[in-house]
Image: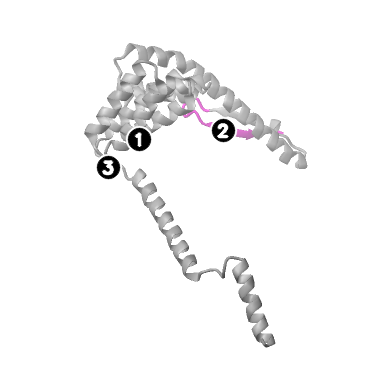
Amino acid sequence: EFSMADDEGVSRKEEADRSGGAPDLADESKGDAESKASVEEADKADIAVHLVKKDVTKAIESKNQGNEHFKTREFDLALEKYAQAIELCPESEPEKLAAIHCNSAAVHCKTKNWDKVIESCTAALKWNPDYVKAYLRRSMAYENQDKPVEAYEDIKKADQLAPNTSIIKAKAAKLGPIAQERQEKMKDEMLGKLKDLGNMFLGNFGMSMDNFKAQKDPNTGQYNISYQP
């Protein structure tokens, strides 16, 4: 005969047998260890992807391959090769890095992705602040985004760096008046907003901005403000 305690023990054993046995703590620990090892291996692989060994020869090779794709209008492939070249090119080669970024900008010019043109040219100018071609391409991008002021600033810089280039001078001559007109318009809009704000404040005192007159000093270009009740 079995005691109540024995009945409970047998019952627990039967339940364990039906459920496939009690969990093995050793197996759980093994599973956790394997999972942790898998995560660590994945992390190492991810780090390895980003740790590209710098090699200027391979960078130039990738850049040249990008140029070939550019010539055949395979723009996506060209960008891939230029990106690869940038990864491979050491920072001790700033002019080469600038040239590769500017080549990427040339691709974006073809696809009319003006934001990317600006981004690539700005990166090029980080490595070579006197890179005329980068200023020219960024100026073109700004012009296509209807930003004549920014476009003119870049073309002026290009003209300073290459003063004997007739094409650049012609472009600067064209953009100059457009940029000036836009600046005047922006100034008028800003002054209009300031006037509205001033009237809102001065109205509490029975005055308006019309009581104040601004006169420009022709010698200094500064404005003198006078109050006229």
Which image quarter is the C terminus in?
A: top right
- Mark 2, mark 3: which one is toward the viewer? 3
Nearest-to-viewer mark from 3 and 1: 3
Q: Which residue is mark 2?
A: 224
Residue at left offset 64%, top offset 84%: 6
Residue, x 25% and y 29% (percent of image)? 60
Residue occupying the point 24% across, 37% down: 55
Secondary structure type for disc 1: helix
Q: Which residues are magenta?
A: 217-229
Pick whichever, 44 or 120, lies toward us: 44
At a point 46% along the width and 22% down the height, the residue shown is 141
Colouring:
one colour
> In the rendered image, which residue does mark 3 sit on?
53
Could you tell me if the residues under marks 2 and 1 are in contact, i.e. CB atoms within 8 Å? no
The mark tally for this picture is 3
- Asked if the residues shown at circle 2 and circle 3 are in contact, with their CB atoms under 8 angstroms apart, the answer is no
Q: Nearer the viewer, mark 2 or mark 1?
A: 1
